[in-house]
Image (cartoon, rainbow, N blue to C red):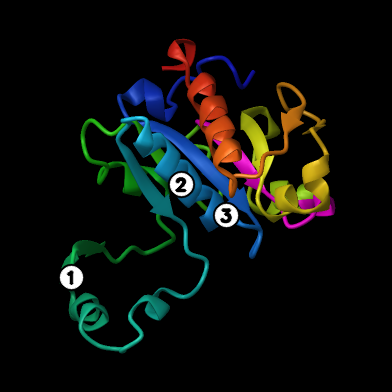
Amino acid sequence: MAQDIVPGRAAERGLPHILTIAGLKKSGKTTVAAALIRELRARGLRVGSVKTIHHHPQDLDRSGADTRRHAEAGAEFTVALLDGEIAYFEPRASRPGFRDAARLFAPGVHYVVWEGTSDPEAGGGHVVCLSQMSDLDATLATRRVDPGWMIAISGVVAGKGGGDVAAVSVPGAPAALPVIDATQPTGAAALADLVIRWFGEDRA
């Protein structure tokens, strides 16, 4: 059952709690992820993030030069120093997953907000973002979400007609799932409360 500790999950390996924000394109994932990061940080928690990108990796280097050329030349990794941030690039033979990202997590981080496709290795909890309620089944299948790990529904749907729905029953979910508009301060706070409760001491 999702609430039970599952051997091999992230928290059992001394890693941060992994919160996946899953949804189809234009469902509000980035908005929800940013709202949760802000709210968790405001509570004094250390938060990191991961973003699964579904376009071709060369789109990250629009100049068509520098970092991409280093990788093509055979560099095992490239660190790009930018104004106010550092980017890390490492060529992989296939799409990287949770194990690849986890080794880069800073020690002492409480939560990692992972925007994109669910990774079974990560375990954790999931907030599913929808444009409309009818997208639910397609979202769960496309983003490989286990309903047993769902905490709430948010995204675009929560700020329009679907936001009038207090909770949604999803087969396999541990309980009816609240629909929360994270764009509102009260909604972001409520969603953070749910996340913190989900990752309570019994799941640490």
Residue 82's spot in the image, x, y percent?
18, 71
What residue is at 21 percent from the left and 34 percent from the top? Answer: 107
Mark 2 vs mark 3: give the one in front.
3
Q: Give the camera-side residue of 97 and 171.
A: 171
The span shown in magenta is 124-135
On the picture, is 47 further left or further right than 78? right
Residue 28's spot in the image, x, y percent?
61, 57
Residue 77's spot in the image, x, y percent?
19, 64
Q: Secondary structure at mark 2?
A: strand
Q: Amino acid at mark 1?
A: Asp
What is the number of callouts on the image? Answer: 3
Q: Give the camera-side residue of 7 and 89.
A: 89
Q: Amino acid at mark 2?
A: Trp
What residue is at 61 percent from the left and 22 percent from the top? Answer: 2
Mark 3, residue position: 29
Residue 72's spot in the image, x, y percent?
24, 80
Q: Within the magenta stretch, is there residue 146?
A: no
Q: Secondary structure at mark 1?
A: loop
- In which quadrant is the C terminus drawn? top left
Residue lying at the far top of the rendered structure: 202
Residue 163 has which mark?
A: none
Disc 3 or 1, which lies upstream in sequence?
3
The CA span between labels 3 and 1 is 26 Å
What residue is at 44 percent from the left and 60 percent from the top? Answer: 95
Q: Amino acid at mark 3?
A: Lys
Mark 1, residue position: 83
On the picture, is 132 further left or further right than 67? right
Residue lying at the far front of the rendered structure: 185
Disc 2 or 3, which lies upstream in sequence?
3
What residue is at 53 percent from the left and 26 percent from the top? Answer: 193
Mark 2, residue position: 114
Give the vertical position of 43 relative to 145 (above or below): above
